[in-house]
Amino acid sequence: AQSVAQPEDQVNVAEGNPLTVKCTYSVSGNPYLFWYVQYPNRGLQFLLKYITGDNLVKGSYGFEAEFNKSQTSFHLKKPSALVSDSALYFCAVFNTDKLIFGTGTRLQVFP
Amino acid sequence: DSGVTQTPKHLITATGQRVTLRCSPRSGDLSVYWYQQSLDQGLQFLIHYYNGEERAKGNILERFSAQQFPDLHSELNLSSLELGDSALYFCASSGGGPNSPLHFGNGTRLTVT
């Protein structure tokens, strides 16, 4: 079965520092990978996707993700974190008419 | 604003009761997905409809059912409610297929007492 794993429940980073939120995937065939963000009491918001092509994908709010086939990873990154980036981040994989989410990583950015 | 509308925002009901959650997708989107989010289970896929037809089903309980109507809005029916059904229920819509991101509503928070 196709799945994604987010090994960290929480990531803490100081404002202005680079951030990375990790995701690994397990799929057969070509992966369709996504990152979403959830703010308190809100639905998930789409950040970026990898379908094919360049391994570095740029998305909303300055986020980007690097697809690494050999390591089966799709880590979310941002060069300089903002306090307003604090939220719950979900990695997801599209599999046979459904989007399967990881368990989520809470990002806390400290001033 | 994602363009996906879910009603009601909050619902409090008793065990054994039945409720209906409603979702209006973004204009032009043919796919509707339902998810359940609880603290201990994370974000669980329930069911996906495309243009009125069921396309995929997750670990949806037999007490739960859904449908998508000709005008593309969808309803999720939860019956014989149990305390463990308390959760946030999200609807999402997309144009269909793996290339189309899902756009989520703000959810319906269900509390079963």
Image (cartoon, grey):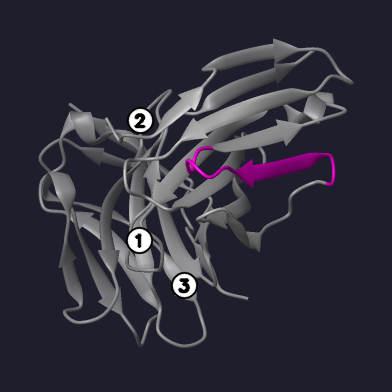
Is the residue B108 above or below the residue A101 in the image? above
Q: Which amino acid does the dot numbered 3 rest on?
A: Tyr
Name the residue tied to disc 3: A25
Three-letter amino acid code of the residue under disc 2: Tyr
Residue B111 image position (x, y, % from top left): 69, 17
Residue under circle 2? A39
Q: Where does the N terminus of chain B fall, quadrant-wise? A: top left
To the question of a shared chain for discs 1 and 2, the answer is yes
Q: Chain of mark 1?
A: A
Lateral position of residue B68 relative to residue A19, left or right:
right
Q: CA distance from mark 1 to mark 2?
A: 17 Å
Dividing the picture into quadrants, the one containing residue A17 is top left
Q: Is residue A32 magenta?
A: no
SS for dot 3: strand
Residue under pointer 1 = A34
Name the residue rendered at 17%, 72% in the picture.
A56
- Mark 1 burial class by Cα count in 10 Å: few <14, some 14-19, many 20+: many
Query: Mark on residue B22?
Result: none
Q: Which region shows up in magenta? A: B62-73
Task: Say which of A70 and A29 sits in front.
Answer: A29
Q: Position of residue A107 (x, y in %)?
A: 34, 40
